[in-house]
Image (cartoon, rainbow, N blue to C red):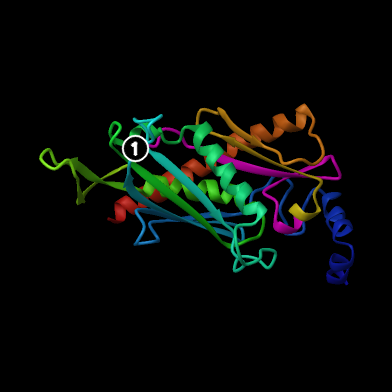
Amino acid sequence: MAAGFKIAEPLEYHRSFLKENCRPDGRELSEFRTTTLNIGSISTADGSALVKVGNTTVMCGIKVELTNPLVEAPGKGFIVPNVDLPPLCSSRFRPGPPGEQAQAASQFIADVIESSEVIQTEDLCIERGKLCWVLYCDMMCVDYDGNVLDACIIALLAALKNTKLPEVTINKDTGAPEVNLEKRKGLNIRKHPVGASFCVFDDSILIVDPTAEEEGLSTSHLTVVTDEKERLCVVHKPGGTPLSAEKLQECIGRATARQREIQKLVDKVIHSVKTAQ
């Protein structure tokens, strides 16, 4: 009977749970799904991470390449993020070029990288005006069940912390770069941005870490990104109903708590990998 009600009246089905301050999956309104992290899972990448937030699974692989810096920014390297939402992760996505949601997610991640200053692009410069690194950060959703933005940020942060750049020297005689793959050093991660996503039901009820079904039924979406100093990096709200100042403040407070949780998780996993090596 409940299954039939869920299919026929999905919004009323969710409202019946929200009235009791809980959700169909048993969580409280302000409760995140279990988050797990694995780093270094792609041996062919220079850095990688696999993140699961509930059933949503995102893999991030980072490849580094040498290139020439731009004339207008001779002392800076590049970070190129890309989010892929292929048909294998959900039937809602179609084969072919990136859809609107994937493009919006890629732009959102680019905004997070720039505004949070997770890495200074100056750190990627090898020789001013001549040589620099470009980091290609590819995030692929393997299983989609809502809140893909939070999972992408965690995967990106963990993969960046797992990335090691080979040593590069410039041959004084030929001027050509010489790469030593045996000697590698980690990136200088300056900030640790973490996102927290929210949905609003019936213009008033706020829930965190929405599933795909909850996203489809909500009237508004919001993602807040903060760093370890509780600095607000990005507030992403693609349309929908407006939020009151009190609700927004509540979201920011929950996002800062989430940042601390995820940074502990990332540090713990990286420490365990170093210990195992």
Mark 1: amino acid: Leu
Residue 253 painted magenta: no
Residue 252 lies, in percent from the top left, at: 65, 32
Report the number of numbered marks.
1
| Pointer 1 local density, CA inside 10 Å: few below 14, some 14–19, many at least 20 | many
Left or right side of 235 for 204:
right
Q: Identify whether 94 is placed above or below 193.
A: below
Which residue shows up at 83% across the image and 50% down it? Answer: 18
Work out which residue is located at the far left of the displayed protein and give it.
173
Q: Would residue 132 be found to the left or right of residue 7 on screen?
A: left
| Identity of the residue drawn at 58% across and 43% down | 107
Question: What kind of element bears circle 1?
Answer: helix
Q: Find residue 200 and report its horizontal and vertical position in percent.
A: 78, 43
Residue drawn at point x = 63 percent, y = 61 percent: 144
Residue span colored magenta: 188-214
Residue 79 falls in image quadrant: top left
Residue 190: name its quadrant. top left
Q: What residue do we see at 66% from left, 52% from top?
A: 101
Q: Which one is nearer the viewer's eye here, 223 or 100?
A: 100
- Quadrant that contains the C terminus: bottom left
Q: Is residue 274 above or below residue 145?
A: above
Q: Which residue is under mark 1?
A: 124
Residue nearest the observer in this picture, 219 or 201: 219
Q: Is residue 29 above or below residue 120?
A: below
Residue 147, x across and y down, in percent:
65, 51
Between residue 141 and residue 15, name the one nearer to us. Answer: 141
Q: Quadrant of the N terminus?
A: bottom right
Membership of 189 in magenta stretch: yes
Residue 9 percent coordinates (x, y):
89, 62
Is 254 positioned to the left or the right of 214 in the image?
left
